[in-house]
Amino acid sequence: MARFLSRERLAALSDADYDALGSLHFAVNDLRHEWVASCAVLERMIALTDHADHADGTSRFSHRSEALSEVARAASRYSRAVEMAMWPCVSAYTVLGITILDRVVSGRAPLPSATVRALSAEPTLAELQSAVSIPVASLRCARSAELQASEQQEQKELLTTVEGVYFNLAHDARDKPLNREQAAACRLTEADDPGIDPLWDNLMDPLISLAEQNILEIGFYLARQD
């Protein structure tokens, strides 16, 4: 991720805005490194286990494959735990950043500290969907038409992915399928089912990128107002 903008660059933000964005930025940044590392370990353990299973298939003993399988299961649990800690930060960072950018561009007064604190927590699926549905043209008004068009396409793809989460929450493979109203009101960490792929599987990377862009966009917009 890019470096977080200085207080001077974001001087027009309230202390609550700046502190909350900074806290979420560094949480996401640190956890992202751990997530990438945990995924690499898991992939390596899966490859080693596969090789051991093949080698032990011709032996009367399977100590190697059994030991590596246990470590692979532990690596999987750890990687999932990192994601569980990371998702609330990534989703909150995205929603808070969009909300503040929309507020700055629209010229509205700073949000109350209590509102900033509430937006710093994991959003419901409906809250996330609402934030990422704000038209790109109103958020990226300081950018070129070409860039806006590119980001409109990215927004369309992101909203399609969010719709996929609604579909997955309703799938009968889940222990407790949710209808659309229930899914909209849920937080993905609360609805997570360890037995299947995480609900945020295809959302994490694009939201990290979007959250980072939101901060840069706030700084860019404010610089143009000076």
Image (cartoon, helix red, strand yellow):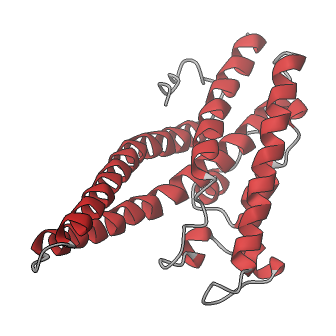
Whether residue 170 is visible here, answered yes or no, is yes
**Residue lying farthest to the front in this orientation:** 58
Q: Nearer the viewer, residue 43 or 37?
A: 43
Image quadrant in which the C terminus is located: top right
Query: Which residue is painted at 69% across and 18% down in the image?
Result: 220
Instruction: Give coordinates of residue 199: x percent, y percent.
Output: 61, 66
Hey, which quadrant is residue 218 in on the image?
top right
Q: Nearer the viewer, residue 107 or 153?
A: 153
Hey, which quadrant is residue 211 in on the image?
top right
* Residue 103 vertical placement versus 40 (above, below): above
**Residue lying farthest to the bottom in this orientation:** 175
Instruction: Give coordinates of residue 144: x percent, y percent.
Output: 85, 15
Q: Nearer the viewer, residue 123 or 49?
A: 49
Q: Nearer the viewer, residue 179 or 128?
A: 179
Instruction: Give coordinates of residue 201: x percent, y percent.
Output: 58, 58
* Residue 226 vertical placement versus 14 (above, below): above
Query: Which residue is painted at 80% across and 52% down in the image?
Result: 159
